[in-house]
Amino acid sequence: MEEEVGSPEDKQFSCFSDAVFIPKDSNTLSVEVINSIETAVAGGKVVEVVSIVKEIVRKVSRNTKKIAVTGDSGNGMSSFINALRLIGHDEEDSAPTGVVRTTQKPASYSSSHFPYVELWDLPGLGATAQSVESYLDEMQISTYDLIIIIASEQFSSNHVKLAKAMQRMRKKFYVVWTKLDRDLSTSALTESQLRQTIQKNIRENLQKDGVRVPPMFLVSVMEPESHDFPKLREMLPKDLVDVKYHGLSKTLYQTCENIINKKVESIKKIIDADNLQREFGISDPDNLLECRKVFQESFGVDDESLRQVALKMKKPDTHLKTSMESQGYHQDGGLLAWLYSSGTQLVSTGLNMACCIFSHRRNTQQKGILNETAGKAKNVLWKILEDSISHP
Ligand SMILES: Nc1nc2c(ncn2[C@@H]2O[C@H](COP(=O)(O)OP(=O)(O)OP(=O)(O)O)[C@@H](O)[C@H]2O)c(=O)[nH]1
Ligand SMILES: [Mg+2]
């Protein structure tokens, strides 16, 4: 069969990665998605990488995240959920509250203030002799993305144990101190002094048990727009974005990096076999400028490709240029050409040795340009991932 002749950009490198870890529960990163990124990177089709990453980010942004609201029974978990949703306790969809133990099994609530979020009202701890560990097992706490520990009146040993378990499980968690209105009505301290006293008490209790202090919010459901409620409503969506995209850029970058490294290795073999001319259609392999141009086109980081990528990302033309600044290989093409032409003047006995040295030097320089281009391609891909994932 006749060998297919194509432009350098059309060349497909069969170097698919098998080293990328795809979380079992991932509904956005499938083997197919990873394969499509690998194919695009291998073919130097960076614009296509941008499209794939955008699609992943779009899907991830619609992933529903689960928040568990827990604490000692009667601390005010259900009331807190209603207040966070800015709804009254008697509305049709509100979480039932009461002075007697009310919440018997986990129940989920949603709010237009927090799209793609499920707020889970859990039965409280403390009413039975159940240990914190078996409570967390029963509540399947590992399935939640963020945990809010509610406390009021006292920060108990159960609260400390819950916080410690969250730290061990590497879960993002907050402590919310509620019923602040009651504390204020019974205390002789000013609001600011009282706040400091409560915060100090929580902090000391946690630190005593080696728990790093999480974000703390002091609230009263009587005033759902006051105290720390505004701060909490601002912080929660930001943290949920972190939770959603955690590890994604790293996984995708690892995919791209693997492919680029494999592509570099396969081009190095072409250089060693002196086949650049045949494989890449380079007219003069001694011309390092031409080599660089062809490598850049092959990795999709030539000026035109970068312009297209910036356009796709809705960024200015120059957006990716900084990742591509040249490192001064320009003049070397001339020097090498001169050395070669000088080589021809050597006496015939020394000619073979000189050619060997020049050929070695040329290969080294071509590989240098290849490495430089691959490094720039990695920078560009990292920037694409960073821009798309950190600021979706
Ligand atoms: N004054 C005042 N009362 C509150 C506040 N939050 C909750 N309460 C009251 O505390 C009691 C218990 O509240 P719930 O929200 O039902 O508590 P819970 O933690 O869900 O309790 P269980 O579901 O029974 O485990 C209710 O009578 C609430 O009205 C608050 O911020 N201020
Ligand atoms: Mg409840």
Image (cartoon, rainbow, N blue to C red):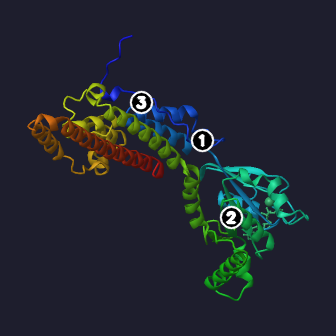
Q: Secondary structure at mark 1?
A: loop
Q: Secondary structure at mark 2?
A: helix
In the picture, the quarter occupied by the N terminus is: top left
Three-letter amino acid code of the residue under disc 3: Phe
**Neighbour class for label 3 at 10 Å: few (<14), some, many (≥20)?**
some
Three-letter amino acid code of the residue under disc 1: Ile
Disc assigned to residue 13: 3
Residue beneath label 1, please? 22
Three-letter amino acid code of the residue under disc 2: Gln
- Image quadrant in which you'd find residue 364: top left
Tell me if the residue at label 2 has its CB under 8 Å from ligand 1.
no
Which is more N-terminal, label 2 or label 3?
3
Q: Are marks 1 and 2 in contact (CB under 8 Å)?
A: no
Please tell me which residue is depicted at 10% across the width and 40% down the height of the picture: 342
Q: Where does residue 298 sit, x and y in percent of width and height?
A: 32, 34
Nearer to me, 11 or 94: 11
